[in-house]
Image: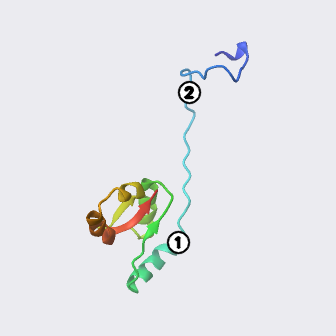
Amino acid sequence: MELEKGFSPAADIPVSGYTCIGIVGIKDLVRPEVREFVALCRSAGVNVRMVTGDNINTATAIARECGILTDPGIAIEGTILRDKSQEEMLNLIPKIQVTSR
């Protein structure tokens, strides 16, 4: 499709001839006090868990930054968790620190 020929919403979208000008990513900052509060909760005996609608990669990165996800903790997607047997869940649940969509 050439612009000289006009534009029609019904026309097929071209599959070539594009130039990538740039890609931008935006990251929301974690509040500075979060890591300290997570550590404070842990020192009081509270198991801190994170359940989020973010994708697993985003959830893992944020949880690590906040001090929620630690070794040997597990981050798992809800869809994977749902497919586990009851025995597998009983083994996994104590290790799960992050659950994502």
* Residue 88: quarter of image: bottom left
| Quarter holding residue 80 | bottom left
Above or below, comparing residue 67 to residue 40 in the picture? above
In the displayed structure, 18 sits above or below 58; it is above
- Tell me which corner region of the image, top left, top right, bottom left or bottom right, holds residue 96: bottom left
Mark number, residue 32? 1
For mark 2, what is the residue? 19
Depth check, front residue: 21 or 80? 80
Percent coordinates x, y for residue 10 in the rendering? 68, 21
Q: What residue sits 38% from the left and 85% below the top?
A: 45
Q: How far across and down, in percent of the image, does residue 101 sit? A: 46, 56
Residue furthest front as drawn: 86
Vertical placement of residue 1 versus 78, above or below: above
Residue sitting at x 49%, y 62%: 52
| Kind of residue indicated by mark 1 | Pro
Residue 97 appears in the figure: yes
Depth check, front residue: 61 or 75: 75
User: Residue 14 vs residue 69: left or right?
Assistant: right
First-in-chain label (2 vs 1): 2
Q: Which mark is residue 4?
A: none
Q: Amino acid at mark 2?
A: Thr
The residue positioned 46% from the left and 73% from the top of the image is: 35
User: Is 35 placed above or below 44 here?
Assistant: above
Left or right placement of residue 14 versus residue 73 in this view = right
Give me the C-alpha separation between circle 2 and circle 1. Answer: 39 Å
Q: How many marks?
A: 2
Residue 42 percent location from the top left of the image: 39, 81
Viewer-nearest residue: 23 or 53: 53
